[in-house]
Amino acid sequence: KRTFPKASVSILTNGRRFRDYSIVRKITTVNHSRLEFGISLQSDIAAIHDSIMGAAGSFADTVLGLHNLALARQKVEIRVVLTRQNIHRLPHLAEFIYRNFPFAVHIAFMGLEITGLAENHLDAIWIDPAHIAPLLKKAILILRQRDLDVSIFNLPLCLLPQELRPFARDSISPWKKAFLPECQLCTLQHRCPGLFATSTHQSEGIRPLQS
């Protein structure tokens, strides 16, 4: 805040430590007007969230942490990574978010970056994004109809039906954003979020689009 007072600052976290309101109070003393917390929430079911996060009790901690941040009037973004474990619950999760965290300034549904631990557990977590459109569409409509701001991160336009493409954001860092050879024939490449160059696995549905 002292060095770059006008810079936006995003803190990406599982939010578990914020179950302790005294920690949240310490953060608020910084009084940074452009500070935002990106909190991972992977399901409306505690067992599913805990399994994805690899820590028992993390769901309860995260939910309490979200409410503590809201109580302290901090800006909160909720981030949902799209995996095999949680995809079938997306509409339920959207309803859960609306009913419990209507204060969220943004909700992001995020495609997987297949690297590191994700690569080691590919069979358990990977589902081709080309196959999730109906459930993703339901979830996004639930949130938009309640006037919540929602986006899709890390998925190329060709894996989304046309009605979901306006929600796609250019969210991949430039240094690890890439396109496949077939993308060179796509007339929408200039506004496509692209792919993770770091991912060892890509969707079979990637194809050039013609505007």
Image (cartoon, rainbow, N blue to C red):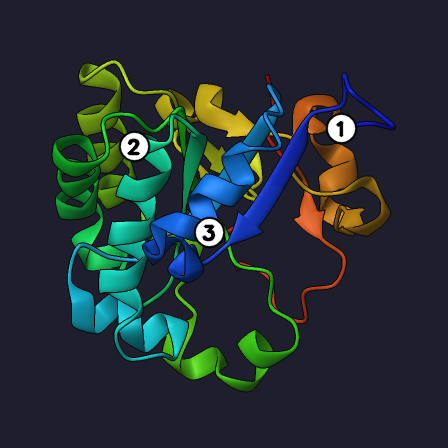
Count residues near mark 2 (Cα–Cα under 10 Å), then give few for <14, some for 14-19, many for 20+. Answer: few
Question: Residue 66 vs residue 79: left or right?
Answer: left
The disc at residue 88 is none
Count residues near mark 3 (Cα–Cα under 10 Å), then give few for <14, some for 14-19, many for 20+. Answer: few
* Mark 3 to mark 1 CA distance (whole Å): 18 Å
Hey, what amino acid is under mark 2? Leu
> Regarding mark 1 in the picture, which secondary structure is present there?
loop
Q: Taking the image as drawn, is residue 18 in sight?
A: yes
Q: Quadrant of the C terminus?
A: top right
* Mark 2 to mark 1 CA distance (whole Å): 22 Å
The residue identified by callout 1 is: 1
* Residue lying at 30% horizontally and 32% vertically, measured from the top left: 71
The residue identified by callout 3 is: 23
Hey, what amino acid is under mark 3? Ile
Q: Earlier along the polypeptide chain: callout 2 or callout 1?
A: 1
Question: Residue 51 vs residue 208: left or right?
Answer: left
Q: Earlier along the polypeptide chain: callout 3 or callout 1?
A: 1
Q: Is residue 203 above or below residue 99?
A: below
> Regarding mark 3 in the picture, which secondary structure is present there?
helix
